[in-house]
Amino acid sequence: MNAGKRNARDAALAGAAVEQSLAADHIPPASRKMLWRERIFKALLIVSLLVGMAVLAILVIDVLSDGLGTLNLSFLTSFPSAFPKNAGIESAITGSLWLMAICAFFVIPVGVAAAIYLEEFADRRRWWNRLIELNIQNLAAVPSIVYGILGLAYLVRGPLDLGRTVLAGGLTLGLLVLPVVVISSREALRAVPGSIREGAMGLGATRWQAIWYQVLPAAIPGISTGAILSLSRAIGETAPLIMVGAATFIAFNPTGLNSAFTALPLQIYNWLSSPQAEFKILAASAIIVLLMMLVAINSVAIIIRNRYEKKW
Amino acid sequence: MSPAHDDSTGTSTMDADANTPSPSHEPVHMQTPALNEHMTPKPEAAEKIFELTDVSVRYSGKLAVKDVTVGIGTKQITALIGASGCGKSTLLRCLNRMNDLIPGATVDGSVKYRGQDLYASNVDPVQVRKRIGMVFQKPNPFPKSIYDNIAFGPRVLGMNKDRNLDEIVENALTRASLWDEVKDRLDESAIGMSGGQQQRLCIARTIATNPQVILMDEPCSALDPISTSRIEDLMNELKEQFTIVVVTHNMQQAARVSDMTAYFTVEVAEDDKRYGRLVEFAETETIFTNPSDQRTEDYVTGKVG
């Protein structure tokens, strides 16, 4: 159909539609142009979704085909080795778990407390509170390598002088995800209706009692979902750990906070930069393990969210 | 004092007898016998638990309600009625300093509770709210069990130290006539109850803290007529022990349950800003059958609003 014809038809359709809409007892037929527009729009949305899914699928299939062959129990329970067939990721897994635990132990109380202050106590008419809010939003977007430098300068060396320990690594990751935890906790607190606070305080509860006994418990599903998702981000980070000087060849599990450590992403990075092809295959196996850990962590978050979905 | 007030009617203002229980009323009634012919005898003027003098409330400088002077009787039900935006809820929330929770809210004038200024600098709003409880427009049970909803107040107030919490819960639910309906499911979530049950739970929750006054902000506006009538019955029973101040949009409700009624109206200032004013405060019977102000009459007879 040529353009002139189409315009003429559209004009006729539009005219008819106007006439018909004037007749109150008749519903005009749906405009074809509108229907097509809706279909094209929907198709675009699906294509965008497929782009993301396809990339993920290619990655997963590629990694699985490379790494599944060498993924076995002895791979999971061996330490790194100069010989590919002996090498494993036990110290990387335990290192990552240690990092996650330290990170959680630091970031959840601090992040939730900051969120409670900003959401429940801060007076938004004061410029400093608005400044803090703005800064937290910005911090969430700061590249992770910058946090690595911060960790190196202030945690590993500098004032705290913790050395290249798992504690310094965990705290650095904690700083990295702190803004995300603050923001998601604030959203969870904000989702608790004001009527709950009023109800509690109308009974003679103090502001703190209202928050501690009513608002916070109601917000815990949201807070934990956010916290778990930020931990899953922390566990996948490599750059800050390189900066704080985590070792890549550690043949023992962390023994304490002051222990040297490695982590899964670091082990993967190390193997991938090795010239031997066998190590690249081991890297693929380690990626599978890392992905499975991420899926497991995120599933916990989804389960918590669905289980405690609020019904007010 | 509101210009609408006119002492000669003998019904419109509470200022005159704020401190003295009854002196001025009878003689004034005698002067206007025709108006009072069909009225039932006036209940003994109750002792005042709240004395408000020239109370104005502003939200971030914007006037919400202006110069309210009113006295609220002990163990009476006082209804605040009027169109939307007339400041009746705002005024109610002054009575237990709930307005403190709204940033930028300021209260001028004096609000006295048993002779004590509620807004004095040494008064802790939490202590005020322990004595003056509140029930809200939309039922707002905590997302917890029925038992925990009732037990929360007594727990935070430390009442469970000298009394068994189970007893407090049963007692409160019984007095809110909810016990028989929920006694077998005390550990179920309050969110699963019907709207009317939730609101009675909220009343029970307030009763459990044993306050002196219960403020109710349109407690039935989200409920069906049957639940509404149950709550009204409940209010009548609770009146034996508590002073109740209720904001309502429902004039029939005010007429049915309240002893005293205050009618508020919206006034428009020169700069087109709207604020609420008290027009008339009198016995409910008077407000509905023989109001002294034309605006009140127009409102209660349904000519406006």
Image (tube, rainbow, N blue to C red):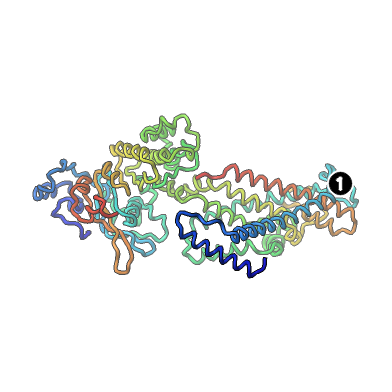
Question: Is A154 situated left or right of B113 in this image?
Answer: right
Could you tell me residue A211's position as x and y percent?
A: 49, 49
Residue nearer the viewer, A121 or B246: B246
Residue under mark 1: which chain is it in?
A: A
Could you tell me residue A59's position as x and y percent?
A: 78, 54
Question: Is A244 situated left or right of B276 in this image?
Answer: right
Report the residue marked by disc 1. Answer: A69
Residue nearer the viewer, B249 or B199: B249
User: In this picture, is B246 found above or below A280?
Assistant: above
Quadrant (top left/top right/bottom left/bottom right) for the N terminus of chain A: bottom right
Where residue B43 sits, quadrant-wise, is top left
What amino acid is labelled 1 in the image? Gly
Question: Is B83 situated left or right of B154 in this image?
Answer: left
Mark 1 burial class by Cα count in 10 Å: few <14, some 14-19, many 20+: few
Q: Secondary structure at mark 1?
A: helix
Where residue B181 sits, quadrant-wise, is top left
Where residue B170 sits, quadrant-wise, is top left
At x 60%, y 46%, the residue is A305
Could you tell me residue A204's position as x and y percent?
A: 40, 46
Question: Is A273 situated left or right of A182 in this image?
Answer: right
Residue A179 visible in image: no
Could you tell me residue B124's position as x and y percent?
A: 38, 52
At x 23%, y 54%, the residue is B298
Residue nearer the viewer, A182 or A164: A182
Residue nearer the viewer, B222 or A210: B222
At x 42%, y 44%, the residue is B139
